[in-house]
């Protein structure tokens, strides 16, 4: 009887403690509602393991950076995506489409390539999450080697591949009034230069090296010494799958050595100092 009495008293005490906690519940809920969510906590909201992330990209031949115009086409980006999938178990699917369709696509989990500056130019109202740069592109104006020191005032026309905007040349173009000649692709832009139909070709340096090996290995082409060079990062972006961007950034950091080896495999140059004409960017500042 005494034991049961003590048990009853213990139960009453626990009931009183529980009542006290319940009285604090509104305050606890209020505190929780104001707790900020950290960026890394987006990893807690995972897609199902069976989910296949759709990466939408441009249907452009931009080797060695990327080229998804044909099935199983080899490129740096394709190899990087395969490496990511093999290391993480996350399944990917890549869909190439015209740039105008890409801008309007709603079912893409991830967009590639992208850049915060390009996003601003699209006037999109959807917030976009960007990865670290997968690589850098070197925006150069290529000329015939004997005209490497051509001045801006001597320019009459520069060929530009369709789908690309030569932002680094826009100010000079307005000042010196030379023409931009749009071509179907980078190959056509280089051919116009080789045939002397334009003074320069606005083609990314790595892309140009790969194309010249096929078009005309003997062509003597150089970077214009007194024209600007742009260094632009290529990123992944997503508006509805921020957890993927976090995972990809972690992969880039964790597999830094393997990623570097991939860049070496595709002979990618990412810095101005990698060019044979290191002084170009400094000299261009005079104009």
Image: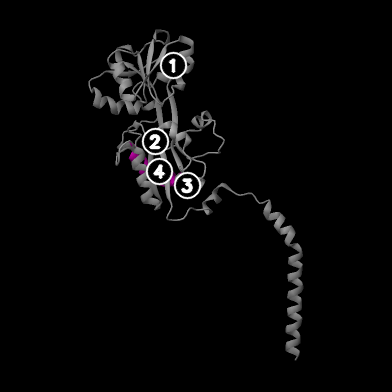
Q: Residues within 10 Å of mark 3 (few under 14, many from 20)?
A: many
Residue 43 visible in image: yes
Query: Relative to the observer, which residue lies in front, 92 or 87?
Result: 92
Chain part drawn in magenta: 249-263
The answer to whether mark 2 and mark 1 are in CB contact below 8 A is no
Q: CA distance from mark 2 to mark 1?
A: 36 Å
Q: Quadrant of residue 233?
A: top left
Which residue is label 4 attached to? 256
The disc, 3 or 4, on the residue closer to the chain's N-terminal end is: 3
> How packed is label 1: few (under 14 Cα within 10 Å), some, or many (20 or more)?
some
**Residue shown at 73% from the left, 87% from the top:** 4
Residue occupied by mark 2? 97
Question: Label 2 to label 4, Cα distance in Å?
Answer: 30 Å
Note whether 160 is above or below 19 in the view shown: above
Q: Residue at x 38, y 24 (%)?
A: 162
Q: What label does residue 284 carry, if any?
A: 1
What secondary structure is found at the residue carrying circle 1?
helix
Is 47 rendered above or below residue 97? below
Residue 9, x across and y down, in percent: 76, 81
Instruction: Report the Cα–Cα distance between label 3 and label 4.
Output: 18 Å
Task: Give the label, 3 or 2, closer to the camera.
Answer: 2
> Along the polypeptide, which appears first: circle 2 or circle 1?
2
Tell me the distance, in whole angstroms, between the alpha carbons under discs 4 and 1: 33 Å
In the image: residue 211, left or right of residue 252: left
Percent across and percent down for residue 147 are 33, 12
Question: Which label sits in the foreground, 3 or 4?
Answer: 3
Q: Is residue 55 magenta?
A: no
Say if mark 3 contacts mark 4, CB within 8 Å.
Answer: no
Q: Which residue is mark 3?
A: 244
Reply above or below: 9 against 113.
below
Residue 271 visible from this viewpoint: no
């Amino acid at each position: 009887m005494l034991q049961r009495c003590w048990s009853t008293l213990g139960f009453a005490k626990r009931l009183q403690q529980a009542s006290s906690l319940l009285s604090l519940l509104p305050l606890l809920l209020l505190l929780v509602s104001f707790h900020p969510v950290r960026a890394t906590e987006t990893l807690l909201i995972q897609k199902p393991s069976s989910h296949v992330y759709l990466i939408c990209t441009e249907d452009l031949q931009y080797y060695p950076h990327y080229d998804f115009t044909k099935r199983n086409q080899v490129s740096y980006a394709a190899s990087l995506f395969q490496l990511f999938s093999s290391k993480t178990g996350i399944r990917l699917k890549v869909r190439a489409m015209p740039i105008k369709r890409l801008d309007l696509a709603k079912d893409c989990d991830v967009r590639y390539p992208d850049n915060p500056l390009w996003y601003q130019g699209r006037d999109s109202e959807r917030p976009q999450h960007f990865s670290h740069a997968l690589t850098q592109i070197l925006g150069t104006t290529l000329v015939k080697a004997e005209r490497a020191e051509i001045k801006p005032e001597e320019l009459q026309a520069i060929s530009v591949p369709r789908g690309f905007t030569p932002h680094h040349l826009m100010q000079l173009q307005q000042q010196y009034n030379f023409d931009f000649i749009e071509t179907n692709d980078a190959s056509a832009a280089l051919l116009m230069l080789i045939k002397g139909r334009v003074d320069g070709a606005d083609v990314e340096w790595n892309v140009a090296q790969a194309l010249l090996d096929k078009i005309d290995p003997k062509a003597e082409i150089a970077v214009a010494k007194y024209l600007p060079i742009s260094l632009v990062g290529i990123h992944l972006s997503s508006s509805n799958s921020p957890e993927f961007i976090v995972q990809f950034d972690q992969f880039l950091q964790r597999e830094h050595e393997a990623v570097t080896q991939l860049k070496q495999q595709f002979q990618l140059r990412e810095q101005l100092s990698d060019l044979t004409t290191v002084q170009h960017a400094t000299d261009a500042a005079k104009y």
